[in-house]
Amino acid sequence: MSVAIASAAILTTAAAVYWFLNRHKPVKHILSELRYTIDMQGAGVGGLIDDWVNIRRNKIVLPDASRKIAVVTGGARGIGAEVVRGLLKANMNVVIGIRKPELAQTLSETMENGQNLTVFQLDLQSLKSVKQFAENVLKKYPAIHILVNNAGIMFGDYKLTEDGIETQLSTNHLGHFYLTHLLLPALKKGGTFEESARVVNVTSCAHYPGKIYFDDINMKEHYDTTAAYAQSKLAQLMSARYINRLLDQEGYPVKCYAVHPGIVDTDLFNGTLFRRLFPWAMKLFFKTPAKGAISIHHACFDKDLEKKSGLYISNCIEGISNRFSKNVEHQQRLFEISCELIGIDANDFGKDL
Ligand SMILES: NC(=O)c1ccc[n+]([C@@H]2O[C@H](COP(=O)([O-])OP(=O)(O)OC[C@H]3O[C@@H](n4cnc5c(N)ncnc54)[C@H](OP(=O)(O)O)[C@@H]3O)[C@@H](O)[C@H]2O)c1
Ligand SMILES: *[C@@H]1O[C@H](CO)[C@@H](O)[C@H](O)[C@H]1NC(C)=O
Ligand SMILES: *[C@@H]1O[C@H](CO)[C@@H](O)[C@H](O)[C@H]1NC(C)=O
Ligand SMILES: *[C@@H]1O[C@H](CO)[C@@H](O)[C@H](O)[C@H]1NC(C)=O
């Protein structure tokens, strides 16, 4: 009984403090932020359970993919670096795009087949930089076999890029949307009907509480950084599905997949309260970046996936994705808005013009 009273008192106090700290905000925003906070913790715990339950499924034997070309965004740190290590091990030629290419110098010296790694500058928060990166890639490799849209950021304050796009949406979704558009002609050349080229989008179970703010995609009216991360990861999942269907209908040998790598101990969590409070818990309960890369390698190489494109993968099997992401009308609306934001006609997406 006294425990119940004490809990009720603590909860009431917490609610009062929360309300007091947020008293200048409209109630609907307070409630929405609260829902996102709770749902995001739920998605995180769900992700951790998924990683433990399926721990034995998360494995891969790398094939020999010599003479094939892979492009990876953000391949010098975290999960991306392990993805690159595996692709090089599979004898691929790998191009990575990062903001400071000089920081990747030691990478090629420490990785097996490191001499087959090329580094170009890429800042996904600038459409101009994405275009320059794509031109550099295409000049070196007119045909490409795998594109891994891995780079990403999580949370942070409200900021717009030079193109006027909210930063998480720009880095995680729109920069990759533009890059995919620019590299698709080369992917269409790289794919064959026996072996399609693949686009692998690194998304997250954090998409689950998300929705797309169609009427205010940059969230200018009210910025909740958790909602913005969820929106950006949801957008990548929806684009993978939509563009996969588009390419299939047009008869091109390019397939798309969306992958949740697991809950992984990387710098992505820098700046979160969780990391400040429980850094030891991350070491103890989260995947290592090498384990996080496995589902991505699976999406790059698994032969059985050829028939199951458009899939959302977690721990090398189909994962649980939210209903919003499967709605084709929502997917199309997002596709049209994204085309508008990068300044192309929707009919020209992925075409060599
Ligand atoms: N860690 C997890 O638990 C988890 C869970 C689900 C999904 N994910 C997803 O996994 C992906 C990789 O994350 P991570 O955990 O490996 O994070 P990380 O260690 O923080 O690495 C992020 C990578 O993104 C690149 N990047 C960030 N902003 C960029 C920009 N504007 N232009 C170009 N590259 C940029 C960084 O490259 P620079 O060297 O240029 O900084 C870096 O290589 C992300 O998409 C993330 O959303 C992670
Ligand atoms: C990787 O680089 C080595 C040395 O330059 C070269 O012999 C080999 O053919 C390259 N591999 C591929 C797949 O191009
Ligand atoms: C992956 O996500 C990006 C950004 O949302 C999107 O542009 C791209 O088309 C998706 N990739 C595919 C084709 O799977
Ligand atoms: C993240 O934090 C760690 C530990 O404090 C630090 O070593 C690392 O440089 C940080 N990374 C980034 C990208 O800020």
Image: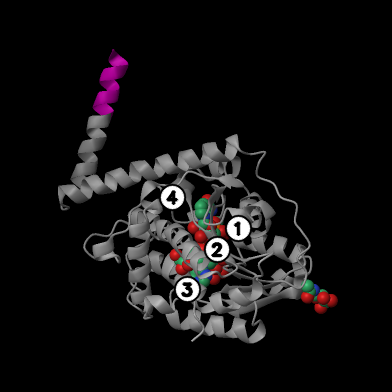
Residue type highlighted by circle 2: Asn
Q: For mark 1, give the secondary structure.
A: helix
Q: Is mark 2 within 8 Å of ligand 1?
A: yes
Cα separation between marks 2 and 3: 11 Å
Q: If you read the primary sequence from the N terminus, does the residue marked by circle 1 or circle 2 appear first?
A: 1
Q: Is mark 3 within 8 Å of ligand 1?
A: yes
Q: Residue at x 21, y 63 (%)?
A: 221
Report x, y in % for residue 353: 48, 87
The image quadrant of residue 133 is bottom right
Would residue 331 be seen by someone viewing this image from the given angle?
A: yes
Specify start and end residues of the magenta stretch as a single range.
1-10
The residue labelled by disc 2 is 150
Q: If you read the primary sequence from the N terminus, does the residue marked by circle 2 or circle 3 appear first?
A: 3
Q: Is mark 4 within 8 Å of ligand 1?
A: yes
Residue type highlighted by circle 1: Ile
Q: For mark 2, give the secondary structure.
A: loop
Tell me, yes or no, whether the two marked residues, 1 and 2, touch with CB atoms within 8 Å: yes
Tell me, yes or no, whether the two marked residues, 2 and 3, touch with CB atoms within 8 Å: no
Q: Give the number of the disc on residue 206.
A: 4
Q: Is mark 1 within 8 Å of ligand 1?
A: yes
Q: Residue at x 25, y 64 (%)?
A: 216
Q: Give the number of the disc on residue 124.
A: 3
